[in-house]
Amino acid sequence: MRDITKRFPGVLANDHVSLELYPGEVLALLGENGAGKSTLMNVLVGLYRPDEGEIVVRGRKVEIHSPRDAAALGIGMVHQNFMLVETMTVAENIILGMPDLPFKPDMEAITARIRELSARYNLEVDPAAYIWQLSVGEQQRVEILKLIYRGAEILILDEPTAVLTPQEAEELRRVIQLMTAEGKAAIFITHKMEEVMAFSQRVMVLARGRVVAEKRTAETSPQELAQLMVGREVLFRLEKRACQPGAVVLEVRDLTAENDKGLPALRGITLQIHAGEILGIAGVAGNGQRELAEAITGLRKATGGSVHIGPHDVTNQPPLRAIQAGVSHIPEDRMGMGAVGNMAVADNLAMKGYRQSPLGTGGVLRYPRILEFARRMIETFRIATPSPQTRVKFLSGGNLQKTILAREITACGGLLVAVHPTRGLDVGATEAVRKLLLEQRDQGAAVLLISEDLEELLAISDRIAVMFEGQIMGIVPAEQATVEALGLMMAGVRS
């Protein structure tokens, strides 16, 4: 890629960026949220046309007008925001758009091949399941399987391990090593420094749409790379005060619920969270974490048991009742559930506060006050947006997450349910979000933190509960927990 420039209204996303990739290597692409990484890769995969610059593949200048053109050149991408059709099955999504399929594909053979790849790479997913029935983590697995199935020669992986366990991330690393040993190449977009060091041979750092550094991985360090990304030293370990638990804020008793397929997802969950405490929930995606968060926040009906927020029984009450009881919710599906893409940043930030003063009075929205509130939130949470009126769908994934965090943390009235709050965020933003969660806890809020990042859970949780097949395998104090012990419980071994 030579001198690639890409502009959007009010944003220069890529400013004369050049990138080289060689057979058999992995290039890590680093940068803060909004630095232009995903835009550059979307140009390479044919989703965007560059305003300036050219692309050369295997010594030949090429024009990539669409993802089909990119696929024909052996280029495939796992996107941060999934490119899947929700009303189609896993198998149908994996083969969708493949040009050499017969009019009536042999779905039995295709399904068998997908099952084989799923088992081989530890990316278990049901080929017959519809996408809308899958958790975000399972959808990520489908995207990775799609690349593997289609045999891409150049792999672009945008935060591919964000929803994988450490064991699954290691399996993905093994897959990439096998593919690069065959002469294939990969571009790896990640914010996890340990993955940069483990996966890549070279690192390129972007800032404000420009290349600010290129390094051989063996000749740099996580600390240096983090400083190049965010322009300051990043603390990889946070200071955490001793927990001072207060009254019980959330009590879940014998909770049962079904998933979208009508199968049991929660099987008698019982837990408590106190004021001033963070309870972390660990587990491989698809083991009931999403259903637990939705049952607590009123988004899913319970089939048994109860949910109490303080003195209020909110079991099977509508979401507004949970909000009135003081619940804030950071959902795992940012664009589908956490934000409205066609609405402005300011409107999305006001979604919790518009019912009362100062943002609204007597059912009338006070837009000057909403804009003032939005500007304050944009500055406080460092949301990179051209203006408060910019539509949310034009933000990078990380800045979309910051918008949701700003709204939910500001509106928190006692209980914060945070589902993967740092997924896809750069190291500086991740540090800031974890500090915010600790601040909420120190100010007396109860925090339910659902995450597949064991490092994160160990760093900021006070207690960690592990879920497996809708049950809690054990609850342990964070200071006594180990990655090995948590991993065993995640695999179904009861504590």
Image (cartoon, helix red, strand yellow):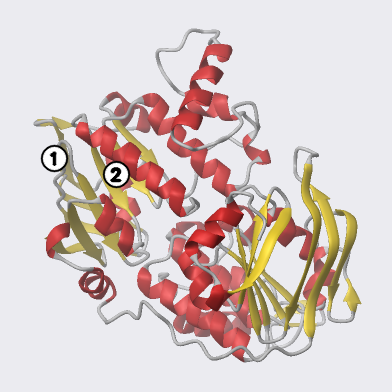
Q: Is residue 474 left or right of residue 252?
A: left
In this rendered view, identify the residue nearer to me: 355 or 118: 118
Q: Is residue 487 left or right of residue 27?
A: right
What amino acid does circle 2 point to? Answer: Val
Q: Is residue 65 above or below residue 199?
A: above
Q: Position of residue 89 (x, y in %)?
A: 61, 28
Q: Which mark is residue 22?
A: 1
Q: Is residue 253 above or below residue 120?
A: below
Q: Which mark is residue 445?
A: none
What amino acid does circle 1 point to? Answer: Tyr
Q: Is residue 273 visible?
A: yes
Q: Position of residue 129 (x, y in %)?
A: 65, 31
Q: Is residue 446 left or right of residue 190?
A: right
Q: Nearer the viewer, mark 1 or mark 2?
A: 1
Q: Which residue is mark 2?
A: 43
Answer with the quarter of the image where residue 63 lies: top left
Q: Quadrant of the N terminus?
A: top left
